[in-house]
Image (tube, grey):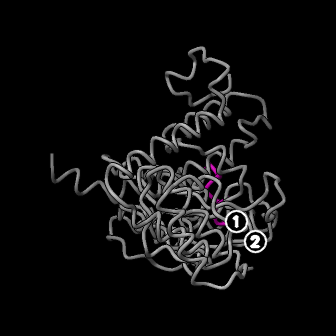
Amino acid sequence: MMLAHVAPNTQRRRSPLWTPATLGSTRRALAQQERESQGPSKSAFELGWDFARYGLDGADMLREDQDFSAGFRAGRSHWPRRRTDDRYVRKWLQLRASALVRGVGFSEAVTPAYLQSIDKPVCPVTRKTMTRCTGEPTDVSVDRINNAIGYHPGNLVVMSVLANGAKANLGSTEMLEVVHALGGRTTGSTCQGLGIQEWARLATLAAYSETFADPAAIEAWPLVVMPAPLMRMPSSAWQRKLELAERALAGEAAAVPAHGAAAFDRFTRAIRSAHADAITQLGDPVRAAEDAWLATDVNRAWVELRDALAAPSQGASS
């Protein structure tokens, strides 16, 4: 049975008048009324100014926003009508417009240059080369990794429209439920167009950005995808695990206590062997480092290392 993340009220019968278009129009009107009650919106005015500055037409979702329109008119009177070809500027403006409509915070540190710095040609979830402006599921998109946080540095990832749509508002725990459901089906089964390994990568990307009450949840998580560029990870446990895996793959001695040295050696042998096998199949060292965590031997060796490192502290506390 395919899992679906459905809000409780979506199963109620709606009037034919309540189409997605009218719902969207109502939300925009309510957002506009709220901004008017709070006075002029500086963010909306500046966004309108920047749309005019770079020669883009007024965003459809903000045409009726008085502050945006005022900024757009002011910008048109100041800037020559030139249309920018810089895709990062265009994406920056689109993201700001979307954030404003939805009432999501947007950091001034998220600039066109920042968006360029996190750009990747290949989707980290589907591992397919992304297209641009074709209307296909392979098109590139920018999404917030953690939906509880706004558009801030470290919380944005470039992925395909297909992966972005599947992610929606799900958190890592809900994505793992999809992984487990697909694991009980026949090989090759998909949910929202993604297979079990793709859902596992999506869940791991989300997990990096979340705060876990129990660090053991992080320690047990296979690193089936590397963190997104400049990604913010609130837990240091992720960085520690990534560092140990990197050292093991490189065949370097890690700064582990003496009681964990033998376990780290076994983990090193396991992950280097799995990595070599994956490189033979993929030819890509980075993807091979991710797929090494699909091997049972690697995860078993990691659990042994984790337990060996934790043993003294557990004994001291008992």
User: How packed is label 1: few (under 14 Cα within 10 Å), some, or many (20 or more)?
Assistant: some
Asked if residue 129 shows in the view, the reply is no
Q: Position of residue 20 (x, y in %)?
A: 65, 34
Residue assigned mark 2: 284
Main SS, magenta region, reads helix
Type of amino acid under label 1: Arg
Q: Is residue 250 magenta?
A: no
The residue lying at 64 percent from left, 68 percent from top is 91
The residue lying at 57 percent from left, 62 percent from top is 95
- Alpha-carbon span between mark 2 and mark 1: 5 Å
Residue assigned mark 1: 287
74 or 199: nearer the viewer: 74
**SS at circle 1:** helix
176 or 276: nearer the viewer: 176
224 or 235: nearer the viewer: 235
The answer to whether residue 217 is left or right of residue 310 is right
Q: Which residues are magenta?
A: 287-296
User: How packed is label 2: few (under 14 Cα within 10 Å), some, or many (20 or more)?
Assistant: few
Q: Are marks 2 and 1 in contact (CB under 8 Å)?
A: yes
